Amino acid sequence: MVNACSSRFVSLRLSGEGSSARVVGRDVGRLPTPVALEEIVLAPGNRMDVLVDLAEGRTELVAVPVDRGQMMGGMMGGAVGPEDSERVLASLDVRGGGGPSVGEAWDGDGGAGAAPGADGLLADLRDAQVDRRRQLAMEMSMGGEMMGGGGRGPGGMMDLTIDGRSFDPDRVDQRVRLGTVEEWTIGNVGPMDHPFHLHVWPMQVLDVDGQAPEEVLWLDVVNVPAGGSVTVRVRFADFGGRTVYHCHILDHEDLGMMGTIVAE
């Protein structure tokens, strides 16, 4: 499943009695241990592999509202808009087939993508030598008030920045060395969640607001909660050159919440 929405966060449920779903992979690889579907929220750009066990009868796949904060001063009318009511995405009419359930048949070694391991791209970086640490700040503010900007947002009302600067394709914001491991702490000083996406290199999540994941977690898009922070480690391997990092809410990146990175 891929959240291809421009700004909507997605949380899914199965409504049929006896049906269940487990998430076995997220973004770049399998999870060490499957988790319940209800525990996962997909920010724009997030992906997950789901193992579904359907009971005979009618089952619905439902998207439920997600509180992701609100614009400055409640400009958008609250945390969850009226369009964010519960929605049925798919209805399934399940008939008996005589085969074993996936829970009985799956041996835990299936799923797409690589699994975390001791070596390779998804090697656990928690005990790795860190070559450099950086801090980034994602911010949205009223145009000109907090950062002295020119009001790049709709009607000149909003500034959306990383480290106080709107995107400039001619500027290099971060330079990294290939073959190194870096630790990035991404802060969000605004009232709304921002999903942070780094092109090319996956990120291992160390903590979200000081709380560490129970198991190794690699993501392409990491949600940075309103008023909070996320710490990740990145192995800059294999691919050099110039690319970007940005908020994965389309309007936010288009309005300046993006930076450039060069790996050499």
Image (cartoon, helix red, strand yellow):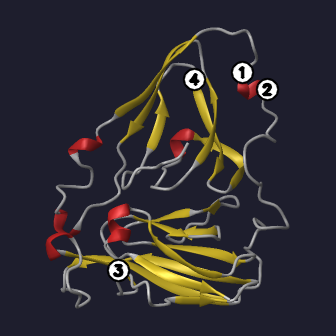
Judging by the rendered image, the residue that carries numbered circle 2 is 105
Q: Quadrant of the C terminus?
A: bottom right
Residue 35: x %, y % from top left: 63, 44
Residue located at (29% from left, 43% from top): 84
Residue located at (19% from left, 69% from top): 154
Q: Earlier in the sequence, mark 4 or mark 2?
A: 4
User: From mark 1 to mark 3, how far is it between C-alphas?
Assistant: 49 Å
Q: Nearer the viewer, mark 4 or mark 3?
A: 3
Q: Earlier in the sequence, mark 1 or mark 3?
A: 1
Residue 211: x %, y % from top left: 56, 66
User: From mark 3 to mark 2, how far is it between C-alphas?
Assistant: 49 Å
Judging by the rendered image, the residue that carries numbered circle 1 is 101
Residue located at (21% from left, 55% from top): 78
Q: Earlier in the sequence, mark 3 or mark 2?
A: 2
Secondary-structure class at tag 3: strand
Q: Residues within 10 Å of mark 3 (few under 14, many from 20)?
A: many
Q: Which mark is residue 161?
A: 3
Judging by the rendered image, the residue that carries numbered circle 4 is 19
Residue located at (78% from left, 40% from top): 110
Residue 122: x %, y % from top left: 75, 65
Q: Earlier in the sequence, mark 1 or mark 4?
A: 4
Which kind of residue does numbered mark 1 sit on? Ser
Please state if 249 lies on the left or on the right of 230 as rendered.
Answer: left
Secondary-structure class at tag 4: loop
